[in-house]
Image (spheres, rainbow, N blue to C red):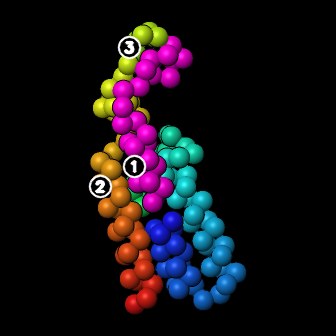
Amino acid sequence: VVAGEAIGLLIGASIYDMEKAMTTMTVVSLALMLLGGFFVDDVPVWLEWGKYASPFKYSFDASRQLIFDRDVPCDGSGALESICNGSSEGSATPEQVIDFLNIQGSVGFNVGLLVVIGVVPRYFAYR
């Protein structure tokens, strides 16, 4: 929330016309949502760099790491088929699930980048 507020504050301070600022913020927030990986898994290669500017990526990765901190049982549903080999017995370790979901960085790293995204745009907005 703080990172999103900071980005909105920066855009609001940069664009003096209220309608243009609201339109720009809508487009920027939708783009950051799409690039963050929550709604779309396969971002085109030429837009890959954009996910690193999105606070949604870091919050999504941190929350998934907090959710998958214990072994995940293989239930035969096929969701973790490459780890469970189609079996309904056994379990996948948190490290296997994190690799399978392509989660980057630790929880601390992701939260730290959220703090940076929350502070840096505020600095430039108030400058």
Cβ–Cβ under 8 Å for marks 2 and 1: no
Residue 126 horizontal side relative to residue 26, left or right: left
Front disc: 1 or 3: 3
Residue plotted at (45% across, 84% down): 125
Residue plotted at (36% across, 67% down): 115
- Residue type at mark 3 is Gly
User: Which secondary structure lies at badge 3?
Assistant: loop
Residue 105 painted magenta: no
Whole-percent x, y for residue 55 in the image: 45, 60
- Reading the image, the residue beneath label 3 is 90
Whole-percent x, y for residue 77 in the image: 54, 17
- Reading the image, the residue beneath label 2 is 109
Residue 62 shows which numbered tag?
1
With respect to residue 72, does 21 lie above or below?
A: below
Residue plotted at (41% across, 25% down): 72
With respect to residue 22, does 79 lie above or below?
A: above
Between residue 119 and residue 15, name the one nearer to us: 119
Task: Measure how far apart labels 1 and 3 are at the Cα level.
Answer: 26 Å
Cβ–Cβ under 8 Å for marks 1 and 3: no
User: Mark 1 or mark 2, which is nearer the start of the sequence?
Assistant: 1
Region in magenta: 54-82
Task: Measure how far apart labels 2 and 3 are at the Cα level.
Answer: 31 Å
- Residue type at mark 1 is Ala
> On the image, which quarter does residue 108 sit in?
bottom left
Residue 39 shows which numbered tag?
none
- Residue type at mark 2 is Phe
Cβ–Cβ under 8 Å for marks 2 and 3: no
